[in-house]
Image (tube, grey):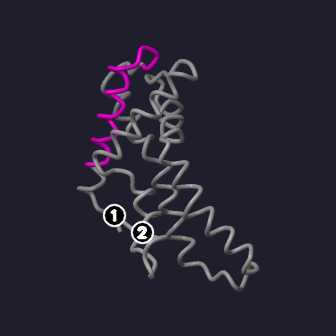
Amino acid sequence: MLRPIRLVRSLAVYAAALIICAWLLDGFAIDGPASCVVGALAFGLPTYAWMLALDLLGSWEPRSRVSSVVWAMIMVVEVSVFPLALATCLPGLLTAEWASPGISIDGGSTYLWACLTTSVILLLLGEQQPLRFMWRFWTSPTPPPRN
């Protein structure tokens, strides 16, 4: 379900995280407000794609197409590996830099510090949906609702 207020809040947090990275890190540059907006939109794309994949996977009938072992492996990857990868913020930063020509991240150490900075900001501001989903999935007796 689309929640416009939550989407706007997420985009604002992503933009703030990019601005803070540009302010703190020498090798991180944002050329202007338009680049920041495009970067914030692109930053969230991997998470939104993962959420869409979860919805599609939830409505798919596994027994008709694949064995239960393959289905279990797909589910473990979808609910554990992808959320951990998304929590590093590397997919979001790579997408933001690729989609917005005004964002540049120079060097591996800048990427490392940008990943750490954005991960901490998103965690503190409650925007780590993949980690929240993974935690609820593994600790609840019933599957968690999708945000």
**Apparent side of residue 79 relative to residue 33 in the rendered image (left or right):** right
* Residue 87 image point, x, y percent: 47, 47
Which of the labelled discs sits on residue 2, or is there none? 1
In the rendered image, the residue lying farthest to the bottom is: 64
| 97, above or below 9, in the image | above
Label 1 sits on a secondary structure element that is: loop
Please identify the quadrant where the C terminus is shown. bottom left
Pick whichever, 101 or 50, lies toward us: 50
Range of magenta residues = 9-28
Dot 2 alpha-carbon crowd within 10 angstroms: few under 14, some 14 to 19, many 20 or more: some
Chief SS of the magenta region: helix
Image coords of residue 127 (percent x, y)? 34, 50
Residue sitting at x 27%, y 41%: 12
Question: Few, some or many C-alpha atoms within 10 Å of disc 1 (few <14, some 14-19, many ≥20)?
Answer: few
Residue wearing tag 2: 136
CA distance separating discs 1 and 2:
21 Å
Residue 34 left/right relative to 97: left
Q: Quadrant of residue 28?
A: top left
Residue farthest to the top, as pictured:
26
Badges 1 and 2: C-beta atoms under 8 Å apart? Answer: no
Check if residue 107 falls in the magenta segment.
Answer: no
